[in-house]
Image: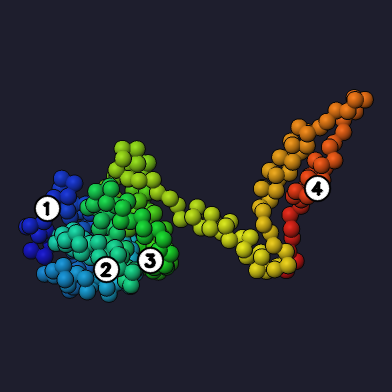
């Protein structure tokens, strides 16, 4: 039957893969024209062509009476259970963004926690916009990185209750995942390193060689050295050695920050 699971499909989380979608949602999908016309008797190869034709994502719409093509293909993947290599190709597909999102949702439903974080976290750097079909049947805009973050941290997606997975810090604590370095931290450090060079290009006559924090530290070091080099003369008055004052004048670093007029 068109609505039955492939007899060679394995149970997921101890149950029939189709049961990962609620029964009332499955009934709506079965009554959708797209399901009856396009999803009957297809294989994994045909599924690739249908996924490439997606133009939006979403769950039920028009008062939760109809289901989107995106949701129909999600259920079809649970039915036929495509190979792991095909799912990874869906996720790594940079040309078809809806195909990538479809593979990410399927892996979130059937994958192990370590696999989910391993293959979905790289998608957080995908900032492309996608069309979202709302429950009212209208269209809005979302971003792939925001949707992937919802898959990793939210309890539901497109009206589907997602299986629970451990938090990332738990998997790091037991040694199954390495610590993740945020891309924002890398970009911030890179920007800080490139700031003096950028100012030097804008104002070539004023080259900044030291950061303000370094100037403050060296100024404090100079004050400490000056206190240690005080010499008490025979009359009991504090004096400064002449050589020390000359050395201080030659190695003094001003605290004032250089401003470039643009």
Q: CA distance from mark 1 to mark 3?
A: 31 Å
95 over 252 or under it: above or below: below
**Which disc number belongs to residue 10?**
1
Pointers 1 and 4 in contact (CB under 8 A)? no
Seen as rendered, the residue at the extreme right is: 235
Instruction: Return the residue at label 2.
Output: 69
Tell me the element at label 1.
loop
What colouring style does the render use?
Answer: rainbow
**Which disc number belongs to residue 132?**
3
Give the residue drawn at x 85%, y 40%.
242
Of the 4 image quadrants, the one containing the C terminus is bottom right
Tell me the element at label 2.
helix
Pointers 1 and 3 in contact (CB under 8 A)? no
| Mark earlier in primary sequence (2, 4) | 2
| Mark earlier in primary sequence (3, 4) | 3
User: Is residue 140 visible in this depiction of the protein?
Assistant: no
Pointers 2 and 4 in contact (CB under 8 A)? no
Pointers 3 and 2 in contact (CB under 8 A)? no
- The residue lying toward the viewer, choosing from 114 and 254, is 254
**Which-is-in-front pick, marks 2 and 4?**
4
Question: Percent from the top left, x then y, of residue 39?
Answer: 17, 69
Q: Residues within 10 Å of mark 3 (few under 14, many from 20)?
A: some
């Amino acid at each position: 039957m068109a609505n039955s699971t492939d007899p060679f499909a394995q149970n997921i989380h101890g149950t029939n893969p189709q049961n990962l979608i609620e029964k009332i949602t499955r009934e709506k999908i079965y009554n959708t024209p797209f399901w009856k016309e396009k999803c009957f008797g297809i294989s994994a190869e045909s599924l690739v062509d249908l996924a490439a034709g997606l133009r939006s994502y979403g769950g039920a719409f028009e008062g939760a009476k109809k289901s989107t093509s995106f949701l129909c293909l999600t259920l079809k993947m649970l039915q036929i259970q495509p190979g792991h290599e095909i799912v990874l190709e869906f996720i790594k597909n940079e040309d078809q963004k809806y195909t990538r999102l479809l593979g990410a949702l399927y892996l979130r439903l059937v994958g192990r926690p370590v696999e989910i974080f391993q293959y979905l976290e790289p998608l957080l750097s995908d900032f492309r916009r996608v069309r979202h079909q709302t429950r009212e049947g209208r269209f809005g805009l979302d971003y792939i990185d925001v949707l992937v973050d919802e898959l990793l941290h939210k309890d539901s997606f497109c009206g589907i209750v997602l299986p629970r997975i451990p938090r990332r810090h738990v998997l790091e604590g037991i040694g199954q995942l390495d610590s993740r370095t945020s891309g924002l931290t890398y970009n911030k450090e890179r920007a800080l390193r490139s700031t003096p060079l950028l100012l030097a290009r804008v104002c070539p006559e004023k080259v900044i060689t030291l950061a303000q924090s370094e100037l403050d530290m060296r100024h404090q070091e100079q004050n400490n050295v000056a206190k240690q080099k005080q010499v008490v003369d025979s009359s009991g008055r504090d004096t400064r050695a002449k050589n020390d004052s000359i050395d201080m004048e030659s190695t003094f670093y001003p605290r004032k920050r250089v401003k470039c007029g643009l």
